[in-house]
Image (spheres, helix red, strand yellow):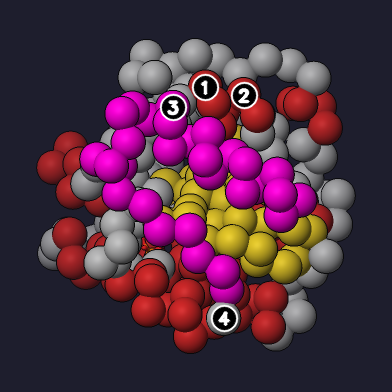
Amino acid sequence: PLRIAVFASGSGSNFEAIAEAVKAERLDASIELLVCDRPEAKVVERVREAGVPVHLFRPKDYPDREAYEREILEQLRAKGVELVVLAGYMRILTNVLVDAFWGRMINIHPSLLPSFPGLHAVRQALEHGVKVTGITVHLVDGGLDSGPILAQRALDIRPKDTEETLGERIHPLEHELYPQVIQDIAAGRIDLERYTNTKPKDGIHS
Ligand code: GAR
């Protein structure tokens, strides 16, 4: 199995979808670690139920982002993690993790990137008035929701959609696509090797 770590800050519904796919043997991976920067987040309850080891931390206990990322990196190495999966981890990463895991770290975002990066992507799409939106899985570089795109799914926006109703249709799409993409990586159908010998782009926000 592909050894993965999941990073999450919030409700953890994507973490759960991945854990369920592993359990159902649709995904040939083992979740070695969950990393969470908000010890009060709902994902922490879910992860305890799933019996996955957790690394919880509070960013303000560290002098800078590099300091807590170095600690995380040590754990990822100790556990032999091969792929880092960001699932609602709401922090920009520094070069400590980006460089160490370039080509081996993915993120999911609730818009058709490069449209609407950052916070509240669903709201941004509604405010802009686009008629089609979707979700994107991409490799993580030093930017905000940037990096080479690996997979996308589109969905129509309905005239009466609100942030809530649209979010309710986006979440199930994410839960279906993300485990599939991880399985495609595990099975070699998505080849990440061609990225690992290039260099990540520095993001404007890093
Ligand atoms: C997901 O919709 C994910 O796409 C988004 O956070 C949500 C986490 O939900 N990520 C981003 O916006 C990244 N910029 P979850 O905690 O229920 O998995």
Q: Amino acid at mark 1?
A: Asn
Q: Position of residue 125 (x, y in %)?
A: 24, 44
**Corner quadrant of residue 118:** top left
Sequence-wise first label, 1 or 4: 4
Sequence-wise first label, 1 or 3: 3
- Res. 110 visible in picture: no
What's the distance in space between the residues labelled 4 and 2, CA to CA? 29 Å
Q: Quadrant of the C terminus?
A: top left
What's the distance in space between the residues labelled 3 and 2, CA to CA? 12 Å
Name the mark nearer the viewer: 1 or 3.
3
Using the image as rendered, state which of residue 29 and residue 192 is in the foreground: 29
128 on left or right of 200: left
Task: Give the labeled residue for mark 1.
Answer: 95
Which residue shows up at 31% across the image and 63% down it?
Answer: 39
Using the image as rendered, state which of residue 66 and residue 88 is in the foreground: 66
Task: Give the labeled residue for mark 2.
Answer: 99
Q: Position of residue 141 (x, y in %)?
A: 53, 26
Q: Secondary structure at mark 4?
A: loop
What's drawn in magenta, residue-wise? 52-81
Task: Give the labeled residue for mark 3.
Answer: 66
Looking at the rendered structure, which numbered label has been put on residue 51?
4
Q: Amino acid at mark 2?
A: Asp
Callout 1: 10 Å neighbours few (<14), some, many (20+)? Answer: some
- Res. 23 visible in picture: yes
Sequence-wise first label, 4 or 2: 4
